[in-house]
Image: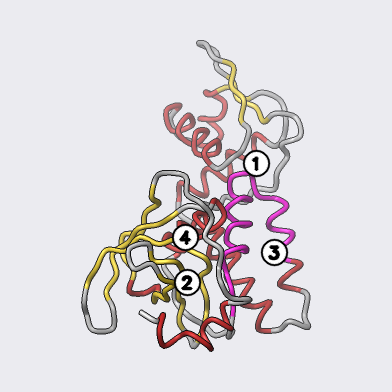
Amino acid sequence: MDAPSHRTLHLLSLLQTGGEWSVPDLAARLTVSPRTVRRDVQRLRDLGYDVHSRPGPGAVYRLRPGTRIPPLLLDADDVTAIITGLLVLEAWSPEDPAAAVARGKIEQVLPPGLRRRAAATALSTQILRAEPAPAAWAAVGTLADAVAQGARIAFSYTDQHDHASERVIAPHRHVLRGGRWYVVGFDIDRDDWRLFRLDRIREVRTVPGVFAEREFPFASVEEWLTSDFGRSGS
């Protein structure tokens, strides 16, 4: 864990003891400047922790009642990686409930924003064959959020012939198959369902706007890959 993360974890543990903490007291306990305390408090808020402040010269901080959350200092990419990894383990040993139980416990203690990312990741992920495979977690997170929200994503793509193009898709799932991650989505410009290798995707971003839901025309991704992979593969 890097120094800022360790320090923020310490700050959260102090706030969880209850009561109000002044900025000078927190700065002394953390051996940092008041400015750093304020920055770390904002980081906790960005992570979804409900830190209340009383403004003025004697500013104090406290966690609101009911916010005694175990100190999991994770960002959105961390959550995407952890949830995806546990889903792979669940697929690897479906008879062993340990990974599913662990995933449920983690989701329970996440702040609301990260809990939504965990749910989006679980929704958008499909494991066809549980094998180790690298992934760009920031891209996976953007994809997962888009699937959960019914949004579109745009990205730069380089195909197997080294041809680069810009794509806009309505994403459906990201799929682990044959030791690689793929993205299944409806290609807007090509008016067809397509398969994209995740490691060939760059500069993923969400497209602004509200769009009609695009229903996947097959019972499952596996059925689509089996019956139509030749026509729709990219």
* Mark drawn on residue 184: 2
Kindly indicate whether the residue at mark 4 contacts the one at mark 1 (C-beta within 8 angstroms): no
What kind of residue is marked 4? Leu
Q: Nearer the viewer, mark 2 or mark 4?
A: 2
* Crowd rating for badge 1 (residues with CA inside 10 Å; few <14, some 14–19, many 20+): some
- Compare marks 2 and 4 and give the one earlier in the sequence: 4
* Crowd rating for badge 2 (residues with CA inside 10 Å; few <14, some 14–19, many 20+): many
136 to the left or right of 217: left
State the CA–CA distance, disc 3 to disc 1: 23 Å
Counting from the top left corner in percent of width and height, residue 190 is at 34, 68
Q: Nearer the viewer, residue 45 or 112?
A: 112
What kind of residue is marked 2? Val
| Majority secondary structure in the magenta region | helix
**Residue 125 is inside the magenta segment:** yes
Read off the magenta span: 102-127
Q: Nearer the viewer, residue 135 or 216?
A: 216
232 to the left or right of 221: left
Counting from the top left corner in percent of width and height, residue 66 is at 76, 34
Q: Secondary structure at mark 4?
A: helix
- Hey, which residue is sitting farthest top in the picture? 57
Q: Which residue is mark 1?
A: 13
State the CA–CA distance, disc 1 to disc 4: 33 Å
What kind of residue is marked 3? Arg
Note whether 96 is above or below 22 in the view shown: below
- Compare marks 3 and 1 and give the one earlier in the sequence: 1
Residue sitting at x 31%, y 65%: 202
Q: Secondary structure at mark 2?
A: strand
